[in-house]
Image (cartoon, rainbow, N blue to C red):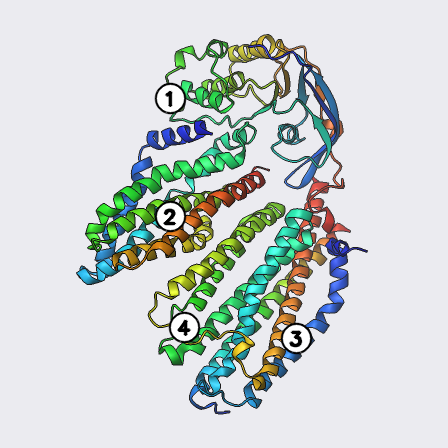
Amino acid sequence: MLDFGKHTFHVWASYGVTVGLLLALIVASLVQARAAKARLDRAEKTDG
Amino acid sequence: MIALLIRDLRLAVRAGGGFGLGLAFFLIVVVLVPFGVGPEREILTRIAPGILWVAALLAALLSLDRIFALDHEDGSLALLATSPLPLEGAALMKALAHWLTTGLPLTLAAPALGFLLHLAPEAYGYLFLSLALGTPALSMIGTFGAALTVGIKRGGLLMSLLVLPLYVPTLIFGAEAVRRGAEGLATAVPLTMLAGITAGAFALLPFASAAALRVNLR
Amino acid sequence: MGYAQTMTRLTVTDLSCARGGIPVLDRVSFAVDAGQALVLRGPNGIGKTTLLRTLAGLQPALAGTVDLPEEEAAYASHADGIKATLTVEENLAFWAQLYGSAVPESVYDAFDLTTLRLRAAGTLSAGQKRRLGLARLGVIGRKVLFLDEPTVSLDTRSVGLFADYLRDTHLAAGGIAVIATHIDLGLDAPVLDLTPFKASATMAGASDEAFL
Amino acid sequence: MSIWEYANPKKFMATTTPVIPWVSWASFGLILVGLGWGLFLTPAAENFEHSVKILFVHVPSVLMAINAWFMMLVTSLIWLVRRHHVSALAARAAAPIGAVMTLIGLATGAIWGQPTWGTWWAWEPRLTSFLILFLFYLGYIALWSAIEDQDTAADLTSVLCIVGSVFAVLSRYAAIFWGQGLHQSATFSADKETNIDPSFWWPAVLSMGGFVLFFIALVLIRTNALIRLRRAMALEARANRGAS
């Protein structure tokens, strides 16, 4: 694992947190988007 | 305008506890703190300004959601909206009524409770002054929060979440003024900022509250 | 307590209004002259309350115009804004003060409240509270009244009292009243049935219209 | 064709949907390159050694946290003035992103300061004002979900956003004033690129660009999702009305 001297842990921790939170946000948004699309398709189907 | 203020004050007194409720809560919070923090004199003296201010803030918050909720339920809010009194004036009077029933008693009682927390002798004047300058802002900001959440069922908790962040500047400058007063430092800056925020709140928030009320009445 | 005899007139042209973002009434038009009343009829949910709230200015209309003398509208609904802990007198005094007028003694007799004058409003019966709510209209001195089911929970004698007040005091002095009610008030007022103005399900103007 | 053309939700969705993949990949690429470069190719700074690399995530997230709120303020004003549904939904879509950006800024700021302060959290003026901003975001998001009628929610949240912006600025000065009370002056304030020497400049700019595109892409995705949701609700409401 690349060694960043004294602050190795700190650097990796901050990147880990950042990527982790961004991924969580992306996943949540995509799940919400897919649910919205599904609901819309159902509404448009019954709307005829 | 004054008619609404007088009616609200009369309602607060008639409903019993109008003046006493906020005060009692303030007393309880201040009395609870030493139980949590311990009776050591040095600790209490140091945190006294902060505790008194946080207690005042929570007491103001406690009695906020009744400001518009009662009028909304019995329909007088709609009648007020169609009266010659503009909603901005109504919001202003409601804030003033809330301050008179909650903020003012707190300001008068706070120095007396300072003894319980071993507040530094020099700080009593600043405590009174900072509360006198700051509590009106608490009422006006609170009235805005109440106007935003008047239509929401069980909106009390949500209102606290909306209003507390808005209280931060007043709390910081208020408590800081007392703390610096206690240590004999210059308190001009925090006190002027405190007064500035209160003035700004009374200039901006009646209009924001009226806008929120109009939306909720739609 | 007569009103200035200026020609007060209420004209409504092509008014469309919505409830909860969905249009309920489309292109309602009518006019009411001074001293006249108009009774609104129609099935529940047709939009009587919505129309009255729009006329009183409590909510914006989707389209159309409402012309009435400036600052002369007053609204009264089921929720009559009575404070239980205040006495009858204090309730009326508050509304009078708010509208910048005084409480005329005649209003106590007109609504049979003389004996209840010093009673706390909370201790009144539903019918008495209703009469106090209506007495407010007599106190605020507004010429154009928009009344939503004013006679609910009133006994026949009180309904008669209210009808007399409307006819002999309010309308006689050149006032106007638009009333949504199913009870015959004995006023020889024209009746407007709102059914023909019911908005079609696909009418434009719904707040979601941009999404459809 | 004025830009207000895009206020029409269907048109907005039609024009933005093809753009989203491009912006998403561009932001992914920029972030990858920016952070990769920053992590592996830059030397250790004089007195901070490698912990300066934390800045490549801290600075962009902090900037995006502020810009997201500013964007919400602008879209709220557009909603109040022009009544365009898309801008109100864009504000609602941006709020969670801004909140997460603030959270990232707080976390990375705390990690960045830990070696100097010796603790994981210090009530340092900058971090404190971002903590307050985070509370504003929570209130805003909570208000949206507390109201059923969508137009009322849009109006009330817009008013809250405007008033909140004024108080957010006030809180910023209050936090700075209050921070001076700490007898330790802010030894470093991790201020923007200004105090970063040239060799760090490129990775910082790249990752910043990446974060901006990330924000845009996600706002578009979330706004379109909200538009579809709103359209579905409208269709369902019409179906109920038609049936009743």
The image position of residue B85, as x and y in percent, is: 52, 29
Q: Which chain's residue wears label 1?
A: C
- Of tags 3 and 4, the one toward the viewer is 4
Mark-to-mark CA distance, 1 and 3? 68 Å
**Callout 2 crowding tier (Cα within 10 Å): few <14, some 14–19, many ≥20:** many
Mark-to-mark CA distance, 2 and 4? 28 Å
Discs 3 and 4 share one subunit = yes
Q: Is residue C144 above or below residue D236?
A: above
Q: Which chain's residue wears label 3?
A: D
- Residue that mark 2 sits on: B134
Q: Residue at x 56, y 26 (%)?
A: C77
Mark-to-mark CA distance, 2 and 3? 46 Å
Q: Quadrant of the N terminus of chain D?
A: bottom right
**Callout 4 crowding tier (Cα within 10 Å): few <14, some 14–19, many ≥20:** few
Q: Identify the image quadrant of residue C206.
A: top right
Q: Amino acid at mark 4?
A: Ala
Q: Amino acid at mark 2?
A: Gly
The image position of residue D174, as x and y in percent, is: 42, 59
- Residue that mark 1 sits on: C120
Q: Residue at x 51, y 59 (%)?
A: D137
The image position of residue D68, as x and y in percent, is: 58, 63
Q: Which chain's residue wears label 2?
A: B
Which labelled disc corresponds to residue D27?
A: 3
Tell me the SS state at disc 4: loop
Discs 2 and 3 share one subunit = no
Q: Amino acid at mark 3?
A: Ser
Tell me the SS state at disc 3: helix
User: Answer yes or no: do the residues labelled 3 and 4 have beta carbons within 8 Å?
Assistant: no
Tell me the SS state at disc 1: loop
- Of tags 1 and 3, the one toward the viewer is 3
